[in-house]
Amino acid sequence: MEAVIDSRTAAELGRHVAAIEKHVPLRPIRSMSDYEAAVQALNALLDAGAAQESHPLANLAATLGELVADYDEAHHAMAAATPAEILLHLMQAHGLKQGDLPEVGSQGVVSEILRGRRELNLRQIRALAQRFGVSPALFLGKEAA
């Protein structure tokens, strides 16, 4: 497909982008407030079903996820960490408590995971990756690196 953007098409695209950006900050993330807004928008998109490839907003969620991941990589780089350490970091970054993660299990289950007494299972990893807009590989731990 050959992209031809004349002034009329550019103006129309500009209106569409402006409408999208009222709800989704689709631009490079340059500050912590930009990051928080992007994560909030990404979570809303994922909650709306955009994690499914067939969803009409799937590409928008994927693009926003990449922007969030780029910022994370540049600003929140973590040395090789255990899945529990990564989960704790994400909880702190999002202001969550142990009881705020029903996709993992009860507060007691989350506590056991954070203390290293229990491992995350594949279902929990997938749910956490979707919730936080990160790759499931993030939760594979030091051994996988």
Image (cartoon, rainbow, N blue to C red):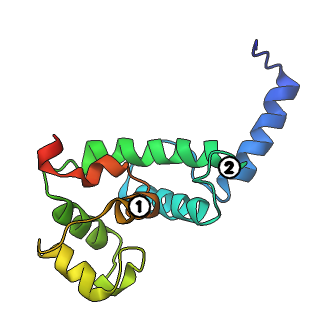
Q: Is residue 79 visible?
A: no
Instruction: Locate residue 116, reporting x and y percent.
Output: 11, 71
Residue at 20% x, 66% y is 119
Q: Is residue 125 left or right of residue 12?
A: left
Farthest residue in the right direction?
Answer: 8
Query: Which quarter of the figure has residue 88?
Result: bottom left
Q: In the rendered view of the protein, which quadrant contains the C terminus?
A: top left
Residue type for callout 1: Phe
Q: Secondary structure at mark 1?
A: helix
For mark 2, what is the residue?
57
Q: Is residue 138 visible?
A: yes
Residue at 38% x, 53% y is 31
Mark pair 2, 1: CA separation:
17 Å
For mark 1, what is the residue?
132
Q: Secondary structure at mark 2?
A: loop
Measured along the vertical axis of the image, is residue 9 above or below residue 1? below
Query: Which quarter of the figure has residue 59?
Result: top right
Whichever of callouts 2 and 1 sits on the residue coming sooner in the sequence is 2
